[in-house]
């Protein structure tokens, strides 16, 4: 009994930590299928997408009953468009992506994809439709080929190479002594933050999801790597409904819509130019960063007056 309990408990801890970081959620769900908190309704249906319009309607949410995190969050990501979410650290940005992936159930309001309430859908079909490029991709202790193919088990070598090319990591892989067979992960080759994100992008390209969640890395990549990742993001988000949890202004400027979150509420929304013209919180964040020469959008909120 004890022997059984400890590993399950341990998995629970890992589960919570990974859930928190958005890292490798897909892998985790296949491992811990029975352990998830949000299950399928008895009459759950398969998600059918046609363009994948994502709608948050008056969403309220708390992790714990005493502390509400999101208040009346209401927005639409039109099919195929990109919405960036910005705001101070702790404002609730990642919580939005966790709710879209249905790690948690909303407490009020609803989230729909093409009009279908997430609560009425099977988790498997929802997660099949969503691809995630997390901040920090955890690699398996296996070959780089396996790590990319994980996006779609059964993919052919040609498809894997095409995805790696599109994610601009093919030349790097070819330069390794063992090429695609090179071992990566903790016990293999250590990849840089940018290389790991490209592996995640290649995985996502193979998976070919209708909806993409991109959790931008907070850790600084050098500006060349950063620009390259931006270009690849643009490529994979083309014709996909995309939510970017943004930490840098450079990502945000091109988005079709920017949501500015403050203490769990959307306080401003619009394009980069419109928000600058509005001279509100977004314009302040922008000015502060220009002054500091700092591109990080997610600095802590100023202390309340
Ligand atoms: P950052 O830019 O620092 O990543 P964020 O805007 O993404 O921040 P969230 O991670 O969405 O912020 O967190 C919003 C709030 O919810 C924070 O106050 C955080 O402490 C709280 N929170 C996050 N996860 C949990 C949890 N599992 N249980 C309780 N509270 C949580």
Image: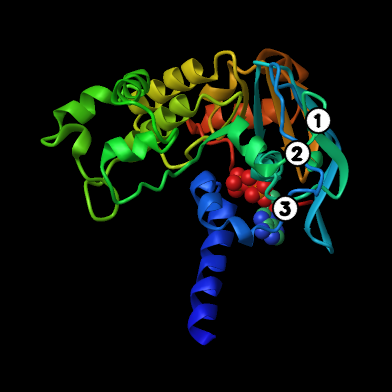
Q: Are there few (<14), some (14-19), or many (20+) residues within 10 Å of tag 2?
A: many
Place of residue 233 in the rendered image (x, y in percent of width and height, measured from the top left): 48, 22
Q: Are there few (<14), some (14-19), or many (20+) residues within 10 Å of tag 3?
A: some
Label 2 to label 3: alpha-carbon separation: 10 Å
- In this view of the protein, which residue sits in the foreground, 277 or 90? 90
Quadrant of the frame with the N terminus: bottom right
- In this view of the protein, which residue sits in the foreground, 199 or 255? 199
Residue at 51% x, 79% y is: 4
- In this view of the protein, which residue sits in the foreground, 226 or 238? 238
Q: Is residue 70 left or right of residue 213?
A: right
Q: Quadrant location of residue 201?
A: top left
First reached walking from the N terminus: tag 1 or tag 3 = 3
Which circle marks residue 116 in the picture?
Answer: 1
Residue at 51% x, 55% y is: 31
Q: Are there few (<14), some (14-19), or many (20+) residues within 10 Å of tag 1?
A: some
Residue at 33% x, 26% y is: 156
The residue tagged 2 is 121
Q: Quadrant location of residue 257?
A: top right
Q: Is residue 261 visible?
A: yes
Looking at the rendered structure, the secondary structure element under dot 2 is: loop
């Amino acid at each position: 009994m004890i022997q059984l309990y400890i590993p399950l408990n341990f998995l629970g801890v890992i589960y919570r930590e990974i859930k928190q970081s958005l890292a490798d959620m897909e892998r985790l769900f296949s491992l811990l299928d029975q352990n998830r908190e949000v299950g399928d309704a008895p009459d759950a249906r398969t998600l059918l997408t046609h363009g994948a319009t994502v709608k948050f309607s008056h969403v309220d949410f708390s992790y714990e009953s005493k502390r509400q995190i999101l208040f009346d969050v209401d927005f639409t990501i039109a099919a195929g468009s990109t919405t960036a979410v910005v705001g101070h650290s702790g404002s609730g940005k990642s919580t939005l992506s966790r709710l879209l992936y249905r790690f948690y159930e909303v407490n009020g309001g609803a989230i729909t994809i093409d009009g279908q309430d997430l609560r009425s859908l099977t988790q498997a079909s929802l997660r099949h439709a969503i691809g995630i490029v997390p901040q920090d991709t955890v690699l398996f202790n296996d070959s780089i080929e396996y790590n990319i193919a994980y996006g779609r088990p059964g993919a052919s070598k040609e498809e894997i190479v095409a995805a790696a090319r599109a994610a601009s990591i093919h030349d790097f892989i070819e330069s390794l002594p063992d090429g695609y067979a090179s071992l990566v992960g903790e016990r293999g080759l250590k990849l840089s933050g940018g290389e790991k994100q490209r592996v995640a992008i290649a995985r996502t390209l193979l998976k070919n999801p209708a909806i993409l969640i991109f959790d931008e890395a907070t850790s600084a990549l050098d500006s060349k790597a950063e620009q390259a990742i931006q270009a690849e993001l643009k490529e994979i988000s083309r014709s996909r409904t995309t939510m970017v949890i943004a930490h840098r202004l450079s990502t945000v400027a091109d988005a079709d819509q920017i949501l500015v979150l403050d203490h769990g509420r959307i306080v401003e929304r619009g394009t980069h130019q419109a928000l600058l013209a509005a001279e509100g919180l977004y314009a302040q964040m922008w000015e502060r960063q220009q002054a500091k020469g700092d591109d990080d959008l997610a600095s802590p909120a100023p202390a309340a007056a």
